[in-house]
Amino acid sequence: MNPERVKFYIELMRSLTSFILGTGAGIYALIATENGSSLLLIFVLILCLFATGVFIALFVYMEKNIEK
């Protein structure tokens, strides 16, 4: 894998990490408030799980395809 592609994947992983942390903070805020919407909580939870799955898939892909 060329260095430019590795840089791209690392930037993608950084973006996914910040998205996961942001949605996690949103989930905490929705749970902590008394008037939180349950539909919004479910939507944000699905977004967080999807981003976590993509992050794990990208990590596994990078581990298999980067020459050591």
Image (tube, grey):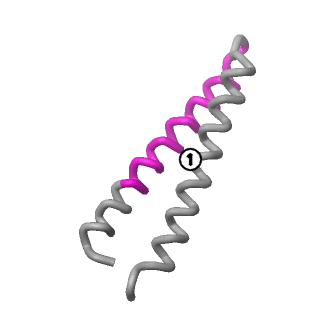
Left or right: 8 in relation to 49:
left
**Does the magenta run of residues contain 54?**
no
Secondary structure at numbered mark 1: helix
Q: Which residue is drawn at 40% across and 48% down?
A: 15
- Up the image or down, 41 lies above or below 6; here it is above
Instruction: Please tell me how many numbered marks the rendered image carries.
Output: 1
Prevailing SS of the magenta stretch: helix
Q: Residue at x 37, y 62 (%)?
A: 9
Quarter of the image with the C terminus is bottom left
Q: Which residue is drawn at 51% across and 70% down?
A: 61
Q: Give the range drawn in magenta.
A: 12-34
**Does the magenta run of residues contain 28?**
yes
- The single residue placed furthest to the left in the displayed view is 4
Q: Position of residue 67 (x, y in %)?
A: 38, 86
- The single residue placed furthest to the bottom in the displayed view is 68
Q: Where is residue 65 in the image (x, y as percent from the top left)?
A: 45, 79
Left or right: 49 in relation to 62:
right
The crowding category of the residue bearing disc 1, from other C-alpha atoms within 10 Å (few below 14, some 14 to 19, many at least 20), is many
Q: Mark 1 points at which residue?
A: 51
Name which residue type carries label 1: Ala
Q: Where is residue 27 in the image (x, y as percent from the top left)?
A: 63, 31
Q: Position of residue 23 (x, y in %)?
A: 55, 36
